[in-house]
Amino acid sequence: MIRPKIDIPVVSKKSAGVFEYGFRTLFLAVILAVIFRFCYVDYADPYKCSALQNQGRWLDPSKRWNSQDDFKNWQPPGCIMHKYKKEDIQKCFRGSASLNSAMVFIGDSTIRQVFWAVARKLNLDKAEEDMAYILDKGHKHDDHEFIFGGTKIRFIWDPWLNSSSLDQELHNFKANPSQNIEDNSAGLILAGAPGLWYARHGGENAFKAFRDSIEKLMPYMDHSKDGKSEKTSVSTKYPSPNFLLLAPVQVPRYQLLSKSRAETITPYKIDQMNDFLQQLSAHSEADILWSYSAMTVDGVKEYEDNGLHVVDNVAARKADVILNLRCNVKSAKDGYPFNRTCCSNYHNRNVFQSLLILLGFVVFPTLSFTPGIRQRFNLGQLFPSIKTLRALGVLALVLCLCFYADRTQVFEKVQKQFQVSGFRWSCLALLLIGLLTIRGTATKSFPTKFSEDGFFSRDQTDEWKGWMQAVILVYHYTHGSQTLWIYIIIRLLIAAYLFNTGYGHTLYFLRKEDYSLERAATVLLRLNLLSCVLPIMMRTEYQLYYFAPLVTFWFLVIYFTLKIGRKHNTNVVFFFNKLILSAALATAFTKTPGVLEYVSIILKYTCAIHLDAKEWRFRISTDMYIVYFGMAFAALLHRSTRPHTPRLKLDNLMHLTKSTSSKFFAIFAALMVIPLFWAAARKASSKYEYNSWQPYISCFPVLAYIALRNSHSILRNYHSIAFTWLGKISLETYVLQFHIWLAGDSTGLLRTGIFGSRIDAMILTPLFLWVSWHAADVTQQITDWFVGGSTMQDRRIDYKSPYLLPRSGPAASPSANGKQRAGTPSKNLRFDFGGGRVQKRASWALVKMGSSLRLRLGMLALVIWLINVLYR
């Protein structure tokens, strides 16, 4: 058969060096620009309190009247505004304002809307019931109280801002909260500027009366008269300061006003009053909520039909603005996700974080680039090679980047907003990249010569992981989880990844028969290095980066399933019975009520590890059986390539599948399975319903894809080098996206604050991939150094290994003649610490540690345990 001649471009070392230099220059330029913006541009508002109070824009403006799904996402400049819920509000005001209301709202009907918006957050049903009762009794112009769960909020009807109740609240108000139980100050007071009422009923002296009522509030609102400002004083060491806030005059939708209102509420009057407030805001430090005006500026659909009041979603976002101002200071104490970055500060660095920063910026660079220090102090034998030290240094710098990007205000963070067009265009761009980078498989000796690839080759699995990871990244970036059909696709891709996990590891174990501790340690360290050190630096939990724990769990299941009775793995009946037993045990372990809860309790009190049993049960059970399908597929494929294996009926059946008619039938079945699966999956009415089907149906489209991908030699022998490259670093891209591409522990998006959102995405995305690529390289180097891994020559020999980790050689056991494996610390290593007893024992301990992987693993486990127990 004539094969096409193709030229496969090979990236030279010079070209690679140019690319590396370019990325380093771009990275340094971005870091310097962001630091300049933070230190000079944002100097007056580092915590984004003023930004939350004064500015913002809608990420989801309405496209139709009376939509219940619009005006839910208000974006202040450069920070993530949290949508407060009942538990958040109760936690914020717990222990404060014990003799008075936690929140007091004073003003007209526009302020009453914000009051009821907070009440709905506390208890929707009770708030709706109370509102219906008040309207039925005609008491809408009365004072109201709403109490739920120990939290009390109060509305004072005072459209003129001249009542005795207002005087009493102002008299009791204290900006700094007190722990004294006799403190009657409200935690937050929102007063509405009485412009609408004065414009409608104030007559000729409306503006003068309005000005007098505002000036009455100024002694309580102007922080500058106290000699200090509290507007941007944000600290996590102290309780949240109490706030006295003023809402500007709400600009109505004049075209919708009734005739009688339109005659008195004129643009001239409203603009005159708000201009006066603007002047006060410019010459004082009074907290005036200009973001309220920004919510309705030039708007139409933000208003109800009367043109005076806003729709419920806008009122709810107004409530969120004041709650974020008042309550976000305490949010750092609640731990991750750190998704409230408006008017909030992060924790001060602890000892472990400071140590990692010191290692990344000082220790490792000094030891790596100044070898004279090692020789001067005779430290050469105590430390690894220069190459390994530099790998450790790069890893520490990656951790520092994560910290400064997602645990400081240096980078800006913004909220996500799903748009189906954005998801589709991003996937189309990925498809175009994949098509443009399709190349044929090259031989190892001659990179420009075409090579015939086998069934389901390593390049295919890497490419598969790559394009799946690309779609998952787009899914996270665009917030596609809000749409059911996209969620179904992503769940299927995760199932396919786990199928590859079962397939790859099983095929490796069956072919190599290597169940050594070195092999297990290599895989486990490679999978978990980043996801174990990131919680230390970022104050998160191991379970947050759930994919690493998930594939770790399934690797252990695969490892012990195949290792137990491994001498009989060639027996088909024994092997499949073992798979069935393993699946039954895994199902019982996961779904039996109380088992995971008991495990989580043990981990909590013995290792200080917090395991969410409910979340972990969901992660495992949703894809419970797809790994076993991958294991079975690998076993059948392995058996078909072993001609010396005794033939069974199963072998005869497998032989029949190689006929031409069987291949056509498999292709036809695969073409039918995918649309049938999609039609069935789309019938699910919710995520919960689809998740219940996923373990039993996900294998069909996965197997159909494999059949189609290998249905012809052209499809087998060509692959996208872009997706293949991404597949090799898929683990690092998944873990690092939480902090250096996304933000707020993946709840928001990272921004430089200098360019627009599109330019930021175009700059930060390649930098994110570049950092992930380096992280993948150094984690492999560190793993090889710690375990005593194979040499680069060994890795080249294992180039076609299908297991799913980046190409690294098998952790083979020492040979029978006792020769040391490449990279393993020498047993003849000696340290000259002197002739004392303590020095000799230290020398012996270091030699023993260098020659025993079990001791190194034990020491590593001890260090991790100590960090967990001592971490604060």
Image: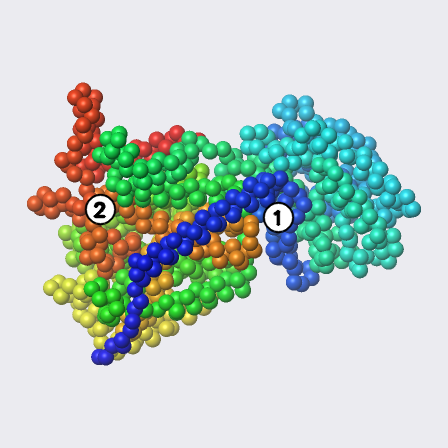
On the rendered image, what quadrant is the C terminus found in? top left
Q: Is residue 742 left or right of residue 647?
A: right
The residue sitting at 69% across, 59% down in the picture is 66
Q: Which mark is residue 789?
A: 2
Task: Report crowding for label 2: few under 14, some 14 to 19, many 20 or more residues within 10 A (C-alpha).
Answer: many
Tell me the quarter of the picture where residue 162 sits: top right
Which amino acid type is shown beneath numbered disc 1?
Pro
Q: Is residue 236 left or right of residue 623?
A: right
Q: Is residue 584 left or right of residue 171?
A: left
User: Percent position (x, y) of residue 606?
Assistant: 35, 32
- 819 or 311: nearer the viewer: 819
The residue sitting at 14% across, 43% down in the picture is 820
Instruction: Give the number of marks.
Output: 2
User: Percent position (x, y) of residue 616?
Assistant: 40, 46
Using the rendered image of the protein, determine whether residue 550 is visible from the camera's viewpoint.
no
Using the rendered image of the protein, determine whether residue 659 is visible from the camera's viewpoint.
yes
Q: Is residue 630 left or right of residue 281?
A: left
User: Percent position (x, y) of residue 611?
Assistant: 40, 40
On the rendered image, what quadrant is the N terminus found in? bottom left
Which residue in the structure is indicated by mark 1? Answer: 76
The residue sitting at 38% across, 53% down in the picture is 21
User: Percent position (x, y) of residue 183?
Assistant: 68, 25
Most extreme residue toward the left is: 817
- 389 or 539: nearer the viewer: 389
